[in-house]
Amino acid sequence: MYSWQAGKLTIVLNEKGQITSMNDAVSGKSYASAAHAAPLIRVLIDGRLEAPLSADYEVESDVLTLQFKESGVKVGVAIKVKELYMTFTVTCIDGADVDAIIWGPYVTTIAGSIGEAVGVVHDGQFAIGIQALNVKTIGGWPMEVEKLQFAYQSFEDAKFEYESCAAWPSSEGSLLQLFSRNRTKAARRPVWNLPDIEVAAIGGIEAEIVGSSIAMFGCGANRVLDTIEAVELGEDLPHPMIEGVWGKTSPAANQSYLITDFSESTMAVAVQYTRKAGLRYVYHPDPFGQWGHFSLKPHSFPNGDDGLKSCVDLAEGMGVHVGIHTLSNFTTLNDPYVTPVPDERLQAVGVARLVEPVIADDVNIVVDDPHPFAANLFRRSARIGSELIEYDAISGSAPWKLLGVRRGVNSTAAYAHEAGAEISRLWDHGYDVFFPNIELQDEYSQRIAELFSKTGLKQISFDGLEGCYASGHDGYGVNRFVKMCYDGWGDDVINDASIVVPNYLWHIFTRFNWGEPWGAATREGQLEWRLSNQRFFARNFIPPMLGWFLVRSATDQFEATVLDEIEWVLSKAAGFNAGFALVADMGVLQRNGNINVLFESVRQWEMARQAGAFTEEQRERLRDPKGDWHLRSMGEGRWNLYPVNISKPLVCNPAELQPGQPGGADWTFYNRHADQPLKFCLRVSPSYGNDESSVKRPAFFANGIYMTFETEILTNQYFVCDGDRIGKIYDQNWNLQKTVETSMDAPIVRNGGQTLAFSCKFEGDPKPSVSVKVFTWGDPETVEDSSR
């Protein structure tokens, strides 16, 4: 039996190379599975898993030798014990050609928090963690290998499949696992969404299993980040700093930001909007005319990289950092890697050969292998030399003929090809893109790194990072892509990714800002997804983010964004202490007359959030998706927080009135707050497209008081009263059109149930409809900068 101390975790290994004990060294509590053996390493040879038969540890050299009987393999593992953790590193493999090794799975009885990306599990008191120490050591399980029996537990809240997870529920609690492949030889295995793909060999030490290395540790649940930081510093892992503080603990890591389509000519304006919102990052959502070479759009950046650098310099001079969005290794069809001469390093699903010669205008193409062309992808594209073709299908029987062939597509040249010439089915995607192989992918990373280094950009999202899977090299391909970028730009670049979080890249990624706003109202857009993300962030020790939210101008589908929508977002962000992105193109920013009010609200809420002004009890209430709140500044570092109730739209529809009945409606209304003056927002909507209609002389009656406004409100306009005698008329984009005043004070809305009566004169045929939202506020709570 051999015993080591991994921080506060005592690990015992038996003579068979199995971990038999994982104990809290302080309490003595055992966390190892009693039912399932946990070999330190398993080997994979020709699809078969093998556990070691014996283990021999040489104390003087700190090398453990694992003997595998059936294959005759010997694996040497160097062991180092540090203050807070220990490391295991494969130093040699002898006796057989090993396809992969698997670290674990190490089965624990901890079932509380399972961090599938970070590789840490804890029960609120004690944590056990596993960390990949280099890019070739991958969090998860080889996709082609059947799960072990104890791993067939569901993880309903997981963001990734089992094969990509460093931690997962087990039949007794949880498991921890990493693996490394022998990538020096070609192989067939499942790749991304396809079941059986030929994967090319690669060279270099990263392709070898020798050198695969992990860290293990045990610590108090409240010391996980301290311990991982020690691992990063002690093992020369990426340790990015954000404003001088480690990225995982920096208050600046989950800053909110503005996403807008700035250009060389509009950069100053974009920065002004960013500063109005109290934000320090502005981010371009689509700066590139091509993905692959990442050439900037000439109409936005006529001076190319130098023009972008001038934008960054201008922004930095005003205290604002600049970021951009990418689609990682997605390669657009207009990129020089694709046209007019396609690069031979574009990733192929498979390769066949021409059975017969093909002349320049021939559409009869017969191949010797149908499998690559039957793969279920998007475009059905293939490369023959420097020509691209497309086809509709492959014949159902030999001779294997491509059907519906189109020659010389995408501005490539059609020419003659000899029998026996290679034809490569290209890996494509519904975004209408191709992918590079892993060597070409390196050029993409180098271009991104050089762009950041040259221009001074400080933020990036690796959207579409799952495209790196097309290389066939699973998490290693992802690790390699991002690590090369990181090595080129260094610290202080806030970065996130789409949906891929290999264990190693946990150290590089700053955060993840998942949650998209497209096609849904602000309060509805992927709400459950956004909330489940917060649980993912918490269990994986990742700075929380709430996603993207649109600031809209009016469209046929949606109204322009208003203050209560923005404050709903801001209150949830404060509740989760999460950052977010506001998305608005420059046109929207200039059309929406509410923008100054909206952005001042953003500034106040974010200032209070970052100052730690909300108590934990307040934050819990702010997290309620059904709750609305208003924050009002009361001077430096102090705010009043008001609970707000917004009624459902109260509708007055003239089509529902009886003949001769005057225009009006009686609405039942319940005020859950104290007595207060009536505050409302009235909207006039056209019926059957009649934009020439209007309402005149709107009047409200409540608790014995009439309030009448002598004015006309046109269709697609809003009429707002904030509990005083003033009514304001806005157009559909909240640009103020007119202010009117009534002689009566606003009626009082009493606490409890009551009737609100409304009347007006409808003009036009067909007449418009009226909807009214009533706002009531509760008593304010004090919110104060925690440092005061």
Image (cartoon, grey):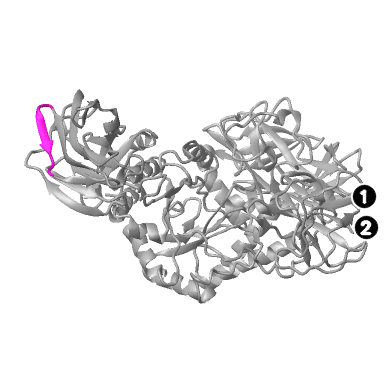
Residue farthest top in this picture: 753
The residue that appears at 85% across and 62% down in the rendered structure is 362
User: Could you say which quadrant of the image residue 315 lies in?
Assistant: bottom left
Quadrant where the N terminus lies? top right
Residue type marked 2: Val
Q: Decide: marks 2, 1 in contact (CB < 8 A)?
A: yes
Picture layout, residue 331 above or below residue 627: below
Residue farthest left in this picture: 743
Q: Earlier in the sequence, mark 2 or mark 1?
A: 2
Picture layout, residue 578 above or below residue 275: above
Left or right of 671 on screen, residue 260: right
Mark 1: secondary structure: loop
Name the residue tied to disc 1.
399
In the rendering, at what x and y percent does residue 64 appear?
79, 45
Left or right of 468 on screen, residue 450: left
Mark 2 packing: few (<14 Cα in 10 Å), some, or many (20+)? some
Name the residue tied to disc 2.
355
Q: CA distance from mark 2 to mark 1?
A: 9 Å
In the rendering, at what x and y percent does residue 646 appear?
29, 35
In the rendering, at what x and y percent does residue 459 appear?
50, 60
Which contiguous range is marked in magenta? Answer: 703-710
Mark 2: secondary structure: loop
The residue that appears at 48% across and 69% down in the rendered structure is 300
Residue 652 seen from this side: no
